[in-house]
Image (cartoon, grey):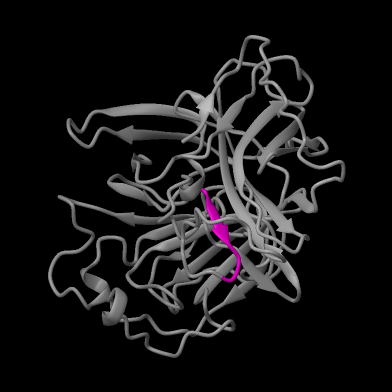
């Protein structure tokens, strides 16, 4: 976990360098982050890519995230050696968490989440100080984006769980959703949410394989903003529900059908809402249509790479499936349900986090 600090002016001393030559590591950010508010903090989710250009392994020991506009302050977050195994993955390794050094010629991805208390000043730039072996690498400042759309609810009613919503959990398959398509490395699923209904700890009642047994199946999907429809795909069958070895899709899953039946909305400003796994025959829009916020565009199904009925909803900077960068946004209003008491607490212009129970109202 990160050790956060947003005030003070003490900086860690820089150790003596072990070599007169620069460390042969290329450090870059996959996509500069955009902070979004949720649960008392501003959250920044992004990734560092570290490539070792030397002929020997190197060991990442610590990362300090510094406010580039106020560098004299304590780091916004510090990630010590003990936190790094759960945050890193070495490209080409099957291990989800890799505490090992970065091999010669290898690349390690560090999945970062920085939280800044609500009301504290937001940085315009971030600087990263990396302790690698006995050396310190200070990366060039990266800009912090501020283009955050206020959008509407995607569904109505209560008992919705924000499954694999924003979090830095190593098991969150959206957060770790790096993908290469046409030579480009991106993470379009970075902040995606799988919306499904949970009642008494279950998402279904009855036959576990029948899509209609799932509470979310057939629920109407709403346009989250005024938008133009730029992509529609229908005709893919619903899958029988099943997870792991019990997943037997109705058709082989390929890049051409991984999203199943879908609608993509152009929200303006280079941002697109992508709805996947919709119910066949339920789509109510066509390419070129203009929809209004709250308009029904179709229904939840289990088509494509869906293990059970849900809608995979993401906002990204391109139209294509599994392409582009996942972007944050905020929902204008919803309530968070306390799982123990059932008490609803309203939220305004925030984004739900992983596994929150949500009431969107009627």
Q: Position of residue 209 (x, y in %)?
A: 22, 78
Q: Give the range drawn in magenta.
A: 87-92
Q: Position of residue 268 (x, y in %)?
A: 74, 50
**Residue nearest the viewer, comparing 362 with 38:** 38
Q: Residue at x 35, y 73 (%)?
A: 307
209 sits to left or right of 157: left
Q: In which quarter of the image is residue 69?
A: top right
- Magenta highlight on residue 173: no
Q: Which residue is drawn at 65% across and 58% down?
A: 57
Quarter of the figure that contains the C terminus:
top left
267 sits to left or right of 89: right
279 versus 172 height, above or below: below
Q: Position of residue 276 (x, y in %)?
A: 50, 67
**Residue nearest the viewer, comparing 183 with 51:** 51
Q: Which residue is drawn at 40% across and 66% down?
A: 300
154 sits to left or right of 185: left
- Residue 292 shows up from this direction: no
The residue sitting at the bottom extreme is 251
């Amino acid at each position: 976990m990160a050790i956060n600090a947003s005030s003070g002016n003490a900086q860690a001393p820089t150790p003596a360098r072990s070599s007169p030559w620069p460390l042969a590591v290329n450090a870059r950010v996959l996509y500069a982050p955009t902070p979004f508010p949720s649960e008392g903090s501003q959250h920044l989710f992004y990734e560092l890519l570290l490539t070792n250009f030397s002929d020997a392994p190197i060991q990442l020991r610590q990362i300090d995230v510094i406010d580039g506009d106020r560098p004299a302050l304590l780091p916004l977050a510090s990630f010590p050696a003990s936190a790094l195994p759960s945050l890193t993955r070495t490209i080409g390794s099957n291990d989800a968490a890799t505490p090992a050094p970065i091999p010669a010629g290898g690349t390690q991805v560090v999945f970062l989440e920085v939280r800044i208390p609500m009301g504290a000043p937001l940085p315009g730039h971030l600087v990263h100080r990396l302790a690698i072996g006995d050396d310190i690498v200070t990366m060039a400042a990266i800009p912090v984006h501020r283009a955050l759309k206020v959008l509407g609810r995607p569904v109505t009613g209560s008992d919705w769980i924000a499954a694999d919503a924003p979090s830095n959990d190593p098991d969150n398959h959206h957060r770790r959703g790096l993908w290469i398509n046409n030579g480009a490395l991106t993470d379009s699923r970075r902040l995606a949410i799988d919306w499904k209904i949970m009642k008494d700890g279950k998402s279904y009642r009855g036959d576990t394989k029948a899509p209609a047994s799932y509470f979310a199946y057939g629920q109407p999907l709403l346009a989250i903003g005024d938008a133009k429809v730029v992509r529609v795909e229908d005709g893919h069958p619903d899958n029988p529900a099943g997870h792991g070895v019990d997943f037997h899709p109705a058709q082989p899953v390929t890049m051409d059908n991984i999203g199943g039946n879908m609608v993509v909305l152009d929200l303006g400003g280079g941002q697109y809402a992508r709805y996947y796994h919709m119910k066949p025959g339920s789509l109510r829009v066509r390419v070129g249509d203009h929809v209004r916020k709250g308009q029904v565009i179709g229904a939840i199904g289990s088509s494509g790479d869906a293990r059970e009925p849900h809608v995979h909803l993401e906002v990204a900077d391109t139209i294509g499936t599994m392409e582009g960068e996942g972007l944050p946004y905020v929902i204008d209003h919803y309530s968070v349900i306390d799982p123990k008491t059932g008490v609803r607490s309203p939220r305004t212009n925030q984004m739900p986090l992983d596994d929150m129970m949500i009431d969107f109202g009627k």
